[in-house]
Image (tube, rainbow, N blue to C red):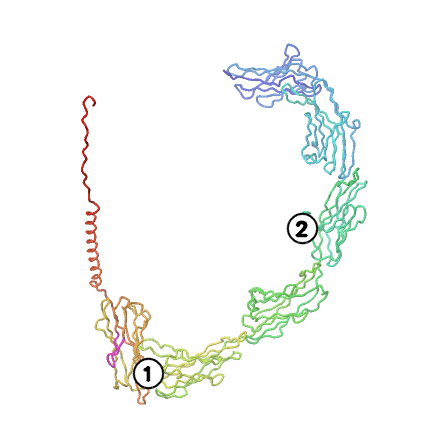
Amino acid sequence: AFCRGRIVRVPKGPLIRVAGTEAVIPCSVSDYDGPSEQNFDWEFSRDTDFVRIVSTWDSTFTSEEYQKRVGRGDIKLRRSSNDAVELVIRNIQPADQGRYKCSTPSTDATVQGNYDAEVQVKVISDGLSVSGSKARSSTSLRLSEGDSFKLRCSASTTSPEHTHLHVTWQLQSSSAWRDILSLTHEGKFQPGPGYEERYRSGDVRLDTGANDTYRLSVAQASSGDGGAYRCLVSEWVRGADGSWQEIQDKSVEIASVSIQRTDVVISTSNVSVTERDSLDLTCNITTDRSGIFQAEVMWYFSASPDDSLSDAQLLLSMDRDSVVSDSTLISLSHVDRNSYRLLVRDVDVEDSGYYFCEAAIWVPLHNGSWHKVVERTSAPVSVVVTALEPDYDVFLNASKTPKFSDDPTELNCRITNAQDTEANIRFTVSWYYRQQLPSDEVATEELLATMDADWTLLPGDRGRERIQNGELIFSKKSADTFSLRIQWTSESDRGDYFCVISAWSRHRNNSWVKSRDVTSAAVSIFWATQDYTLTVEAVKLKPFFVAGHTFEMTCKVSSKNIKTPRYSVLITAEKPFPDRSSPNATTRIISLSQDSVVRLEDWTDQARVDGVVLEKVQENEFRYRMYQTQVSDAGLYRCVVTAWSPGGGGMWREAVNGLSNPIQIDFQTSGPVFNVSVHSDSPAIYQGEVADLLCIITTEGMPLEPDDMSFDVSWFAVRSFALDREPVLLASLDRRGIVTQSRRNGSSDVSLERISPLEFRLRVHGCEDQDFGNHYCAVTPWVRAASGVWQREPDIRAKPIFLSVKMDVLNAFKYPLLIGIGLATVIGLLSCLIGYCSSRWCCKKEVQETRRERRRLMSMEMD
């Protein structure tokens, strides 16, 4: 069985230490009880007896032999944790060789495990020697960036033990030493942090040579390689547990290296040149290299100072053989050993930006080839190319101004006092409009049109549609004059106009770049407007006339503030409705347009198609005639006049409307007075029955013979209880006896007949639900005068009668009931027939006779 207990551990011996160095022996305890912080006692023995050295808890523990060394601190305990300490012996000597025992006082409840452990320490003499290439003094090296250098140190040991050396080259940067490259005690090369890439490329190497020498080779030296170099050698021995232990180290400073940085500088800082001048930049290479070298120079251009060279544009390059790439306007020359000049002739605005100079130093090798040792890029130099702006003024004037709407407007934009306008300058124009607003409001500018560098017209939002319609015309009258013409100026065009003349400069690549804009003073387009005035006067030429004669009236028109007006005339008549309860209805009779085109409007009397005439007597006078007037023509007649003024594109624009005074036509007659009424014996009927409606006409006053009277009768229906819907024409009978029926949606039908000289009957056959509603008749009487001419009397309309359609329940269910009984009877008989057939043919059983088997009886014994 496994029993837990206290365990005290020390390293497995023997421990090899070098005389004169510091020895550290660790001791730890585990699996103990009691407090977490444990105490330790150290003892030493050369032969058999142990001498007490030092304790963590008892200050009187130290023997007299070690009290001085412990008091000076040459021997001390260093606690690394609550359960571990280290015995530190500074400047260990051969007399310290022997056995060291670490023990712990018990804090356990029961005594289990071990409470002490021993380790053997062996002290050997110092046999390690480290030296530089030249005795003890360090060497100072002054190198140029990109050079190579080598440093040597010697390291050896005469230790009686089998030890290995660990050699590390270090560089002091600031106050700390930084590892460059090491040859470990296991024979492996190990580059320091930041030197991995240079080690893989071979720029940093560590070679061993004769006489225990170790050589550090550094190629492509940079400014970061400057500083103090030392060689650090440590001696390692393999312990009893197989691990490597460092027993001592020594170092020696080998050299102090200073690296002269190679800089590439453009001699000038920010540069400002004028367009068409030359740009002169010099790239200087600063180096103290005295040997043979060649420089490779490249000039770059970038629009931003932060761009990398991969995004920049290569202007010119010169290789190490002084071969320059070809360019027409750019040249690169070698001024002296370290200076290279870039010359850009005839600079343009597009040359503004940032210029870089990149230089690479090449040195010859022993085999005749060239090796690039350093490459640098200068800081960017800002170059600003100032454009040559032409000097000129802009003058805007109006050659044509409108006085009325639809008058033309013409504006001329002229370039004056032009200077420095050579052949590489081109002028374009932009036209703007600004609405006139009160002084406390800010008006926005609206672009009418602009021209680009190719003189292509680009319409703005305000003028795009009118430009397409040809209402706005932009032209270039001469080399220094641009014009804007508004063919028909409207009131919305009133406002301020100004032009902007743009100067464009042509660059080396034949592209055009805008260099300057000059704005003209605004020109106001405005005219005083007054309200249009139109007066119409109607005059009746014949004050008294009777039915059958000709009615004649004239309309005289006068207008103000209308440019070259033309008039259109419409004759209207206001006639009362037949029931006399509604206001007069206006009827459009005949019209005459501003182009003198006559048109019949709502004139429906086919017998008098040519009975009305409207003609133009003078420019502002019109005459209306109506032949063979009838009593039904009575009413109020007016002239409705519209004034038109010339609009854009040859069109006419409506200016104002006017209405004349009314002219009344009233006939004083002593003839009969007609009345009409509707009667039905059965206003409530059932569906499918016939509804009889009588239209009865009565006369009052002077009696007439039946042959001297004639009537136009029309029947109407309003499909609602209240008269709130449009009437529907059912049928009509004119005075010649011709019946006209309207199209019907239902299955019912109507008939209209004259049953007596003054009675007309409407029949609705097979009435349906939709035939209900208010029904009435409208009558137009015709009376034959003594001259034999038929005169139309005013229309009259009867008071409506409501026709209701009821459903006959008995007739509605009679046929469905008979049909149901018949179907039920047929289905019952059919069911009986099917049952009988099934019982006769499908359910019949066959009786089979049971066959008797004949077998012999078996004997009881066999059973």
Q: What element carries label 1?
A: strand
Picture quadrant where residue 180 is located: top right
Q: Is residue 776 above or below residue 334?
A: below
In this view of the protein, can residue 666 be seen by the observer? yes
Q: Which residue is drawn at 66% across and 22% down?
A: 245
Name the mark on residue 762.
none
Whether the magenta-drawn stretch holds residue 755 is answered as: yes
- Rounded to the nearest angstrom, the CA distance separating label 2 from label 1 is 98 Å
Name the mark on residue 792.
1
Q: In this view, does 832 lie to the left or right of 281?
A: left
Question: What residue type is disc 2 on?
Answer: Ser
Q: In this view, does 517 lie above or below 627?
A: above
Q: Is mark 2 on a helix, strand or loop?
A: loop
| Extreme-bottom residue of the structure | 787
Q: Give the range drawn in magenta.
A: 752-762
Where is residue 218? Give x, y as percent.
74, 34
Q: Which residue is drawn at 18% across and 23% down?
A: 859
Q: In this view, does 27 lie above or below 548?
A: above
- Which residue lies under the disc numbered 2? 304
Predominant SS of the magenta segment = strand
Tell me the crowding category of disc 2: few under 14, some 14 to 19, or many 20 or more residues within 10 angstroms, Cα based. Answer: some
The mark nearer the N terminus, 2 or 1, is 2
In this view of the protein, can residue 796 be seen by the observer? no
Where is residue 353? Give x, y as percent.
69, 53
Where is residue 853? Give x, y as percent.
19, 32
Q: Is residue 851 left or right of residue 222?
A: left
Picture quadrant where residue 843 is located: top left
Which quadrant is the C terminus positioned in? top left
